[in-house]
Image: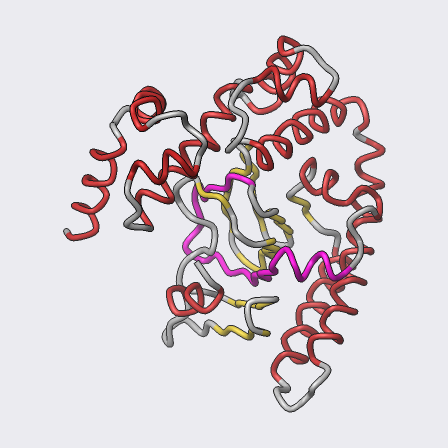
Amino acid sequence: MTVAEIIDKYIDGGNNGSAYSLGDEISIITNPSFAILPSQPHHSPFVVVAYCQQGRGSGRINARTYDIEQGGLFIVLPGQITELVELSDDFEATYLLMTDSFTESLSIGNTFNLRNIIQSHPYKLLSAPAQEAIEDYMRMVRNTIAIEANPNRLEIVQLITRAFFLGLGYFLHEKDESDRAESRQIRLTSEFLELVERNYREHRDLKFYADKMGLTAKYISTIVKASSKRSAMEWIERYVTLDAITQLTSTDLPIKHIAYDLNFPSLSFFGKYFTRVVGLSPATYRAEHKKKGDG
């Protein structure tokens, strides 16, 4: 889904919602008619920064549940499996949606090992000064994007967003240091999940990931299960089947093509794998989804 499609879907005229975009690079959306995070497990195509201004809720990232409250900041990275659990009726939030190419242009990838730290600590309840700072940042982004006559809008937004992430990185780094004992387990789980995100189409065997991390498959299984309540193999299967489900429900590609795209040796092998994990054959799953959509 593109940013334009998200805006069309979630902004309506009756809820004081607003949206400002610089193409698909970065958008700021306030009080959408529904939460941007989906209510079913879903791969996020964007970096999503969600700031809760009112109400309460809860969401999951890679099967870990986080309680959200006023003043909380929630960050989702592309490829992570996200799911909305619940929101209070008075929930209000501002969302920033950024493409990978936009965040890469900020040149902050290695600062404080920021990606791994965000994976370890995707939700933070901000102090009062930090809340003021993020509200100022979001206001500057919104006001800059709104001035369409300014030919330097993108460069300005890049600069202030880089400053925002550098400040956030320092804050999260301090927290990460204080949680060192727990964070080794979380860090290794995050490293495993990041490897799965990049390689699940080519490699569905746990030994590949164990060799990449220089650990035994048994040890990886133990720490991933303890950290995420889901086994390492279940995570690999989840990434593969979510990709397959996305293609089955959002495209008209032949199932044989999807099997080939996910590097299965045959349509039959893909069908058995999908049915074992999901409980339905690919064809039945697509037909059931189409029936619900038509209904």
Q: Quadrant of residue 33?
A: bottom left
Q: How is the image coloured?
A: secondary structure
91 with respect to 274 (left or right)? right
- In front here: 266 or 201? 266
247 with respect to 208 (left or right)? left
Residue 193, percent from left and from top: 61, 31
Q: Is residue 82 magenta?
A: yes
| Relative to 160, residue 170 above or below | above
- In front here: 32 or 46? 46
30 with respect to 150 (left or right)? left
Residue 166, percent from left and from top: 82, 55
| Relative to 108, residue 288 above or below | above
The residue segment tinted magenta is: 80-106
- What quarter of the picture does the N terminus occupy? bottom left
| Relative to 250, residue 230 above or below | above
Residue 23, percent from left and from top: 56, 73
At 38% from the left and 76% from the top, the residue drawn is: 13
At 37% from the left and 34% from the top, the residue drawn is: 259
At 61% from the left and 49% from the top, the residue drawn is: 74
Residue 76, percent from left and from top: 59, 47
